[in-house]
Amino acid sequence: MTLPTMPRRRTRILVLTALLAVGLACSGPTAVAGAHTADAPVSAAFSMGTSVKGRPLTGVHRAYAGATTRVLVIGSIHGDERAGQRVITDLQRGDQPRNLDLWLVRTVNPDGVAADRRTNAHHVDLNRNFPYRWRSINKGTETYSGPAAASEPETRALQALVRRVRPQLIVVFHQPLFGVGANTKGMPTVRALAAGMRLPVKAFACGGVCYGSFTSWVNHRTAGLAVTVEFGRTASDARIRRAAATIRSVGARL
Ligand SMILES: [Zn+2]
């Protein structure tokens, strides 16, 4: 390639720009913070505690510099409902809106996931253990609320994360009730999530009243909005991709 008509100074700038681009691209694999190229969101792992059995509770924070719209996504809280973890995998890849400050937690119940069981290692349903309308209920069943409100380390770790990050929106995935949970705090966002994910809006009442649920605690004790998303018994790859894309687009418009 020749540049016969281009002034020498401009040619030099072009060459410098090209060298800079190559240099940045090459620096990617050695970057400490993970996937980091010239113009991509930066990912950083974070720790939020340990489970009953000592497994690390971890997540990934992913954002462009200066992003301010904080969205926390939880792939699973019940160990035998794991389809939402595939949404987390999708959200850890590719591009995302520049204002979106994503906090991604694959599971807050790694002991339950390892045992393929709803409850944690103390046989407590973490989604009945939060300190809002907590009651001592259902001992010996899959919805045991635990010996006291916030008795479980996984519950306390998630509370601490929410208080630290202060997400405007939290999406937590479950199965198999197939719908997006209605709540009085943020119906426009609930409807937008349901439309994007092609799921119906439903009232999930935990068989009566939701005692000690995570979303109730968030919605009544913090400024943010928490929304339950229930896939069916299975979720196709297309549905997983659609759920991730919806979180990106709805989150960016908060
Ligand atoms: Zn569930």
Image: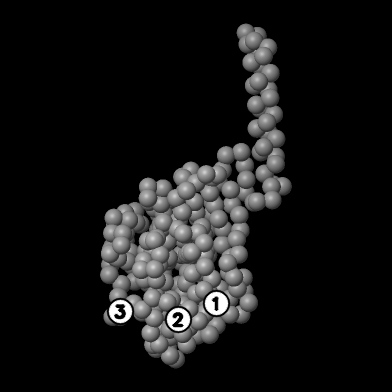
Looking at the image, is 27 positioned above or below residue 103?
A: above
Q: Would you say 23 lies left or right of 39 here?
A: right
Q: CA distance from mark 1 to mark 3?
A: 24 Å
Q: Position of residue 246 (x, y in %)?
A: 39, 53
Q: Secondary structure at mark 2?
A: loop
Residue at the limit of the structure toward the bottom, as seen here: 140
Q: How many marks?
A: 3
Residue at the limit of the structure toward the top, as seen here: 5
Q: Which residue is mark 1?
A: 153
Residue type at mark 2 is Ala
Point 40% across, 87% down: residue: 136
Q: Position of residue 18 (x, y in %)?
A: 66, 27
Give residue 149's mark. Answer: 2
Residue at the limit of the structure toward the right, as seen here: 30
Residue type at mark 1 is Pro
Give residue 30's mark. Answer: none
Q: CA distance from mark 3 to mark 2?
A: 16 Å
- Which of disc 3 and disc 1 is earlier in sequence? 1
Q: Would you say 39 lies left or right of 188 here?
A: right
Looking at the image, is 7 positioned above or below residue 38?
A: above
Within 10 Å of disc 2 (Cα), the crowding (few <14, some 14-19, many 20+) is some
123 and 220: which is toward the camera: 220
Point 47% across, 72% down: residue: 77
Q: CA distance from mark 2 to mark 1?
A: 11 Å
Q: Secondary structure at mark 1?
A: helix
202 and 183: which is toward the camera: 183
